Image: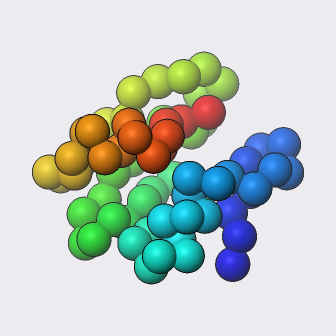
């Protein structure tokens, strides 16, 4: 399975996590990382910070480029 961005390009950071079984996408809005989830502000066409809904390590999230478009 491959995850694509809005322009039809593969999203490398998400695909790396997906291929390592760390990530599940639900309705293109939620990520489930090791039983923790965070909400992406993907409805806005500008960069916004991720609203963390659990104790996901912000450095990990930042390092893998998991940001809303």
- Please give the name of the residue rendered at 84% of the width and 43% of the height, measured from the top-left corner: 7
| Quadrant that contains the C terminus | top right
Is residue 20 found left or right of 62 in the rendered image? right
- Please give the name of the residue rendered at 75% of the width and 56% of the height, measured from the top-left corner: 10
Residue pushed farthest right?
8
In the rendered image, residue 53, in percent from the top left (x then y), is placed at: 23, 48
Count of number-bearing discs: 0
Residue pushed farthest left?
55
- Please give the name of the residue rendered at 81% of the width and 50% of the height, measured from the top-left corner: 9
25 w.r.t. 52: above or below: below
Q: Does the image show residue 25? A: no
Q: Does the image show residue 13? A: yes
| Quadrant that contains the N terminus | bottom right
26 w.r.t. 7: above or below: below
In the rendered image, residue 51, in percent from the top left (x then y), is placed at: 31, 37
What is the basis of the colouring in this image? rainbow
Q: Nearer the viewer, residue 57 or 26?
A: 57
Res 30 quadrant in image: bottom left
In the rendered image, residue 43, in percent from the top left (x then y), is placed at: 59, 36
Is residue 12 found left or right of 52 in the rendered image? right
Is residue 6 found left or right of 55 in the rendered image? right
């Amino acid at each position: 399975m491959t995850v694509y961005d809005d322009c039809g390009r593969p999203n490398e950071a998400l695909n790396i996590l997906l291929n390592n079984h760390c990530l599940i996408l639900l309705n293109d809005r939620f990520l489930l990382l090791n039983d923790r989830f965070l909400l992406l502000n993907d409805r806005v066409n500008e960069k916004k910070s991720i609203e963390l809904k659990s104790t996901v390590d912000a450095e990990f999230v930042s390092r893998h480029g998991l940001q809303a478009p």
